[in-house]
Amino acid sequence: MEDDIKDKLAQFRALVSKIRGYYEAVGLLNWDLRTGAPRKGAEFRSETIGMLDTEMFKLQISDEMANWLDYFSRDEIVKQLDELDRKIVQECKKEFELNKLIPANKFQEYSVLTAHAQTLWEEAKEESDFIGFEPYLSKIVALKKEFIGYWGVKGTPYDTLIDMYEPDMTVEKLDEIFNQLRKRLVPLVEAIQASPNQPEHNFLHQIFAKEQQEKFGLFILEQMGYDFEAGRQDESVHPFATGLNIGDVRITTNYIESDVTNALFSSLHEGGHALYEQNIDEKFAGTPLAEGTSMGIHESQSRLWENMIGRSRAFWERYYVDLQKQYPSQLKDVELEDFYRAINRVQNSLIRIDADELTYNLHIIIRYEIEKMLFNEDLSVKDLPEVWNAKYNEYLGITPPNDGQGVLQDVHWSGGDFGYFASYSLGNMYAAQFLNTMHKELPQFNEWIAEGNLLPIKEWLTAKIYQYGKSLTPAQIIVQVTGEELNPNYLADYLEDKYKEIYKL
Amino acid sequence: MEDDIKDKLAQFRALVSKIRGYYEAVGLLNWDLRTGAPRKGAEFRSETIGMLDTEMFKLQISDEMANWLDYFSRDEIVKQLDELDRKIVQECKKEFELNKLIPANKFQEYSVLTAHAQTLWEEAKEESDFIGFEPYLSKIVALKKEFIGYWGVKGTPYDTLIDMYEPDMTVEKLDEIFNQLRKRLVPLVEAIQASPNQPEHNFLHQIFAKEQQEKFGLFILEQMGYDFEAGRQDESVHPFATGLNIGDVRITTNYIESDVTNALFSSLHEGGHALYEQNIDEKFAGTPLAEGTSMGIHESQSRLWENMIGRSRAFWERYYVDLQKQYPSQLKDVELEDFYRAINRVQNSLIRIDADELTYNLHIIIRYEIEKMLFNEDLSVKDLPEVWNAKYNEYLGITPPNDGQGVLQDVHWSGGDFGYFASYSLGNMYAAQFLNTMHKELPQFNEWIAEGNLLPIKEWLTAKIYQYGKSLTPAQIIVQVTGEELNPNYLADYLEDKYKEIYKL
């Protein structure tokens, strides 16, 4: 490479790295706000987050960035770049093209608003106060619609949002995928409800002191290979994972003493996200490729670890004895098989994050349909609780007693994350498809789990998925790993096999 | 005010507020690095801190800032500004004038280096590894000397550093003040050492479980009026206080189970700093006036709460019974009077932060003299351990067994804070002078403390000192509150009275 190009590349990489610095700062300021920042500092903090987020945004669409992207896209220059630099240019270009039309002051307004709204949401949820929260949510939706105008409508306005979390995914494809899935899941749910073999489950809801829950959760995180020298676990109302840099990927959980597994499955879920980001190849550090490739692939890792591993019989063959040791008086008379069936009990319920693996997808379909109505059919934010409650009644046969357990239950909308929810079900589908391949390539998969030998699984996932970060697209990943495109039947097969056995259908 | 000026003022204030946003972010990134950030993320983190610190620095000396300062200094404009805005302009101008000559890349180098060095210092101290740490410290000193050139030498090079922490303080004045102080303290220390009435103290060094130490410390912080809705306490190797904004002023402490009061006095000390910043008038929020006016006045508050209140007989008349309840088996046979004498035991010792109120000032004088040698007399960093050990031997009659307990004991130099140490003794002097006034204006002072009625003291300090933030100079504060300039005799009087009684001299 010519010295002049080398020099320019160093300058470009410095700009890219500076953007990642802002990304880290915003990530930490948000993490802190959710995990223990004092209340009285929250308002100024929201302003600070908005300000830094906007500075990052300005750099991404700056003239300097435009010039570098122009320069590094010239044919005679591109061919002198190595693959890594080419991909960095590509990714920066994508963000540039996407955001270049958004006025910085609009972005700042949005950014301050969502930082603030996430704090307000915690209180609104606590107090089931949708009316108090509605003006903020309406404003967020209005700004999001304005942004869709700047971003450009792909197919429908909602497609634009979907594409942000799952590149190349569309409403048309999702309608089709969710239809296929629903066709196979609804009869399964009905059969389960009619089954006389309902698992006992009351023993899960005794009092389980937080201290032991924490100890056990940390032990499991260690077992799955979460690196505590490159992360930490804290508490927050809504569990989350956040990657500040490859050496600092944090997770949170939420302890409920009347529920022995809630915090644990949150740890496994967020731990799955974190394993992904902790194991991205070091060469991507300080670049926009040091992230998961899409939220669907990201959620495939959280859902794989939480459900397909964490709620498997093999997992508890190894670890149930340890949990019993933490709570001898509560669990000594509960057999492994009964515990396994209890944590996999299927029940139509109100809260997405507490839902079983099977009906979980119905919670997602409800949100997907409501978001589609918000952005493609002009549903008013004011009418959300009514529509929400009606859909829960229709799909799950139950009506939320209040908005805290209804439309206010999720943090996503307060942060402006419309279009995200589909990722969870996509994640389930990707995960089932990965799992199918793992069983073929790692015939000892179940044995290893039953022995508590989880690290080879982490290593396989690192080799196949994690290391690549954002340098491969979700479509490339799924084809490269499993040999075919996303196919919802793997999830349906997996769920049928698992639940027919549990419910003796 | 004309609309045009109003509009320009709003733009100027937005710039000022943006700078405070960076200040908050850098503060949080540092806080996090010291309180629990994972090791593997520290290197990238240091880069991020350096980057943001530099962005803040660039704004402070930006053309935009220069233009506003120029505009708001014009006679016809100044007279239309209210006092607050005039002071903000003044403060921004001061920072501008100071830093305008420093090249941004030098500043960034310094900033990344000191963020990184603080992490390395923790390990170096732990392992008593001065040789490994020396290159970093040498680089910091070299950069600091270079900066003094940019800042401009006031009197001597070391004066320039002193002035940063204590405006208008000079080496000449400090030499004089320290001389006066030493003349009165040395005979006192000698008399104490010769006294047959040495306090028992072994009972302070049993095993005191951390959990109760924490509980008791939090209780005391609450008693003194520390607002936990505008702050929090965490753990760090070296305790510190950091004000992110007026609604978020955090402190840390460090638990040592073989010492019942170490963490407590750290909490009182950092709590004193925090009370100052939590109680600055809201009108200064988001401006550079929302800080303590000098480190000397800042330390007067930490030392006042830690020693003059926290190590007073009245304080323990109220709170000793609570401490005994936390540790009944360890303290039930220890009388209040013996406890009081033990925590005020004077002993020549190695570690500054563990030193008694009296010899503490000798630790400061040692550092002051060494720093003066570093910057005014070309002492080489390599020779620091030798000089350090010789001075400890000369002034305190003991030699550190290793550098971890010697020259590496303090965090300050790794952060580039040369010139800071004098603030601690200045703080002691200011505090004693304030205390003298308090006794006159609040005749029930001791009674209140003995009743655990600490809030009126906080309120008096708020009314007289805290509320003003940086809007008055240290010299204005001391004269306004006490009616005279800084006078070291108040500290000497206070110490003589206190220790003659304890040691029955």
Image: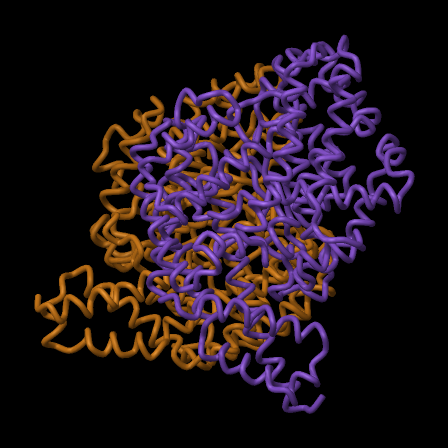
Chain colours: A purple, B orange
Along the line of sight, which residue is nearer the eye, A319 or A421? Answer: A421
Image location of residue B371, percent across then percent down: 53, 67
Determine whether, in the image, residue A110 is placed left or right of residue B117.
Answer: left
B145 vs B293: above or below: below
Question: For the point 13% across and 66% down, which residue is it?
Answer: B81
Image quarter in which the N terminus of chain A is found: bottom right
Determine whether, in the image, residue A170 is placed left or right of residue A445.
Answer: left
Image quarter in which the C terminus of chain A is found: top right
Question: For the point 88% across and 47% down, which residue is it?
Answer: A441
Image location of residue A98, percent across then percent down: 48, 66
Question: For the point 34% across and 56% down, which residue is it?
Answer: A109
Image location of residue B8, percent across then percent down: 19, 70
B268 vs B210: above or below: below
Image location of residue B187, percent across then percent down: 48, 48
Total numbered labels? 0
Residue A345 visible? The answer is: yes
Along the line of sight, which residue is nearer the eye, B274 or A469? Answer: A469
Residue B407 visible? The answer is: no
Along the line of sight, which residue is nearer the eye, B226 or B182? Answer: B226
Question: For the point 79% across and 17% down, which residue is it?
Answer: A336
Along the line of sight, which residue is nearer the eye, B196 or B43? Answer: B43
